[in-house]
Image (cartoon, rainbow, N blue to C red):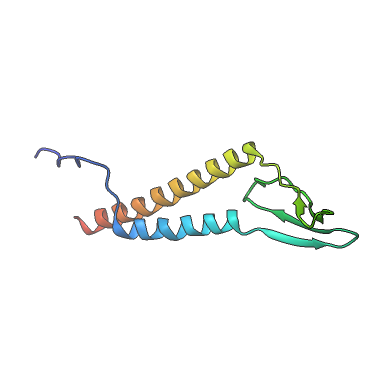
Amino acid sequence: MPPPPRRARFQIHLSTAIVLMFVAGGLIWANVNGRRILIGGPFIGTEQNYGWPCLITEPFTRYITERRDGTWDESLPDISYSGVAVDLAVSVAILFAVWFTCEWLIRRRAARKGA
């Protein structure tokens, strides 16, 4: 008996796609949910940290000061591109592991049923 024909293109099961959507949503939430701490003193300042597992914005203090002409001046954060690369690599690795596990479980179940 000849082997079954291979699929013509990359396909995943619907249940795997749904699980990947939830995992991707959790990863996005973990990376964009910033932590804000108000700092007292002569200036109003906040500290915001973003990213998981590495910080993509370096811990900084943003000071908002009023100029004499009535405008506002604030400092902006420095972005850590190495932190972005690590976060992206970890996210891709997690998504790949979830995809592989879901597809492996589906194939194992199909093999047990004899399909």
Q: Position of residue 25 (x, y in %)?
A: 48, 59
Quadrant of image for the N terminus: top left
Would residue 22 appear left or right of 10 to someone viewing this image?
A: right
Q: In front here: 17 or 97?
A: 17
Residue at 25% in and 56% down: 110
Residue at 44% in and 52% down: 98
Q: In front here: 50 or 100?
A: 50
Q: Quadrant of residue 41?
A: bottom right
Quadrant of image for the C terminus: bottom left
Residue at 41% in and 55% down: 20
Would residue 104 appear left or right of 8 to someone viewing this image?
A: right
Residue at 40% in and 59% down: 19
Q: How many marks?
A: 0
Q: Position of residue 78 (x, y in %)?
A: 70, 42
- Vertical relation: 114 (above or below) 90: below
Residue farthest to the right? Answer: 42
Would residue 68 appear left or right of 75 to someone viewing this image?
A: right
Q: Position of residue 84 (x, y in %)?
A: 59, 41
Q: Quadrant of residue 58?
A: top right
Q: In front here: 22 or 69?
A: 69
Would residue 114 appear left or right of 54 to someone viewing this image?
A: left
Q: In front here: 115 or 80?
A: 80
Residue farthest to the front? Answer: 69
Q: Quadrant of residue 48?
A: bottom right
Q: Position of residue 37 (x, y in %)?
A: 77, 61
Residue farthest to the left? Answer: 1
